[in-house]
Amino acid sequence: MTVGYEPWDKARGAEIIAEHAGLEGATLVILHALQEAFGYVPEPAIPMVAEALNLSRAEVHGVFTFYHDFRKQPAGRHVLKLCRAEACQAAGGDALAARAEAKLGVSLGNTTADERVTLEPIYCLGLCATAPSAMLDGRVIGRLDEARIDALVAEAQR
């Protein structure tokens, strides 16, 4: 899944904010739209959103930091999310996360130097019966073992 994001542009950010400002639940909608356009939510956009919605910067920042899917930096070309919830941990997820970190050379929450892969924790994919699980570019995978995590890492590195 190769995604081309726009470079951050204040005017484009203002346009996105204006398009969604009148919607119900506009804070989340705008943050998602900004991330969809730029690949992350640029820090200068936070006060712009606050002003447009008549909220404090702290309120917008609180929403931004509460939800784990919002990024402060662009993601890599592929995003590999490893479930860190209790069921996945109990089924061996910790060892598989460590294996993925070692193979990619980055810890959870980071992107490889070549910007190919972002490795992220996720706190429940709803696949507890098939734990441990992961998601690669939106595709969920259950019943992970060493061979499957190795295959996912290799796929993400292509």
Image (spheres, rainbow, N blue to C red):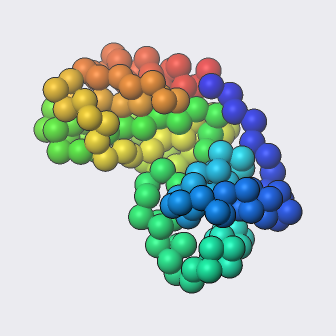
| Above or below: residue 44 compared with residue 134 | below
| Above or below: residue 116 compared with residue 20 | above
User: Residue at left 43%, top 17%?
Assistant: 151
Quadrant including the N terminus: top right
Q: Is residue 41 left or right of residue 107?
A: right
User: Residue at left 31%, top 47%?
Assistant: 123
Identify which residue, 118 or 49, lies in the foreground: 49
Q: Position of residue 99 (x, y in %)?
A: 35, 33
Identify which residue, 99 or 87, lies in the foreground: 87
Q: Quadrant of residue 140?
A: top left
Q: Position of residue 129 (x, y in %)?
A: 16, 26
Q: Is residue 144 visible?
A: yes
| Above or below: residue 133 compared with residue 18 | above
Q: Position of residue 142 (x, y in %)?
A: 29, 23
Q: Is residue 25 left or right of residue 149?
A: right
Q: Is residue 105 visible?
A: no
Q: Quadrant of residue 88?
A: top left
Q: Quadrant of residue 68?
A: bottom left
